[in-house]
Image (tube, rainbow, N blue to C red):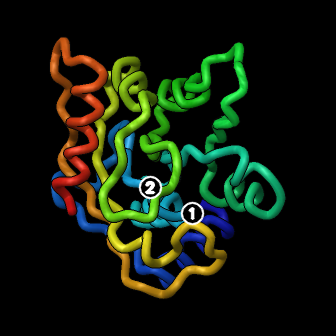
Amino acid sequence: MNVLAWLLAGCTRTLIGAQPRWLGCRPVAELRIYYANHTSHFDTLALWSALPPALRRTTRAVAARDYWGAGARALLATHGFNALFIDRSGQPRKADPLAPLDAALANGQSLIVFPEGTRRAQALPSPFKSGLYHLAGRHRDAELIPVYLDNLWRSMPKGTWLPVPLTCSVRFGAPLMRLEGEDKADFLERARQAIVELV
């Protein structure tokens, strides 16, 4: 792991804690899709920093290109936590927006995703977008790990630039089991509920 990655993880844990609590799984080197509630710009760093160093090296955070893809933030995202950028502009696209995520999983890299699609300053997650459903269907060898990021919406809510020092925790739940024949709406609500149960 490079120096910037070490500094990012260390600063994040110093500022907001990001203490890991492995409640339903262990920090092992399995192919995983970590999916979490999304309340602040620190969410990505908090979850990534809560992973042990060995797992950080093989886990990529999915980040919005419009926020993380330019200037100093792009440097942090690219060279710090090895982000995968996605376009959420809403413009018509010819390419599959999940293709970079598919490629990373196919190469044995775990992912950090936020299925709500945008930040919301609230304790419980909003309904999920469909991306997690499609990833889960395409990559049945990847464990789906629900994660609840506690207190981050108070630490760095939407519209703020600097975090308020608070003790935040990162709670990892049990892998979400797939149900044969389950439709998209039921799957997404069940996945959301798995996070709610970690509150």
Vertical arrangement, residue 30 with respect to residue 80, above or below:
above
Residue sitting at x 75%, y 49%: 69
Task: Please tell me which residue lies in front, 121 or 197.
Answer: 121
Left or right of residue 63, residue 110 in this image: left
Q: At label 2, which amino acid type do we have?
A: His
Residue 36, percent from left and from top: 37, 51
Q: Which residue is mark 2?
A: 38
Which numbered dot is residue 41? 1
Left or right of residue 30, residue 95 in this image: right
Residue sitting at x 56%, y 80%: 163
In this orientation, does residue 99 appear?
A: yes
**Residue at disc 2, secondary structure:** loop
Q: At label 1, which amino acid type do we have?
A: His
Circle count: 2
Residue sitting at x 38%, y 63%: 122
**Residue at disc 1, secondary structure:** loop
Q: Residues within 10 Å of mark 2 (few under 14, many from 20)?
A: many
Quarter of the rendering occupied by the N terminus = bottom right
Residue 77, percent from left and from top: 67, 55
Residue 31, percent from left and from top: 37, 36
Vertical arrangement, residue 93 with respect to residue 90, above or below:
above
Inter-mark Cα distance, 2 to 1: 8 Å
Outermost residue on the right side: it is 71
The answer to which quarter of the image holds residue 161 is bottom right
Residue sitting at x 59%, y 22%: 99
The answer to which quarter of the image holds residue 166 is bottom left
Quarter of the rendering occupied by the C terminus = bottom left
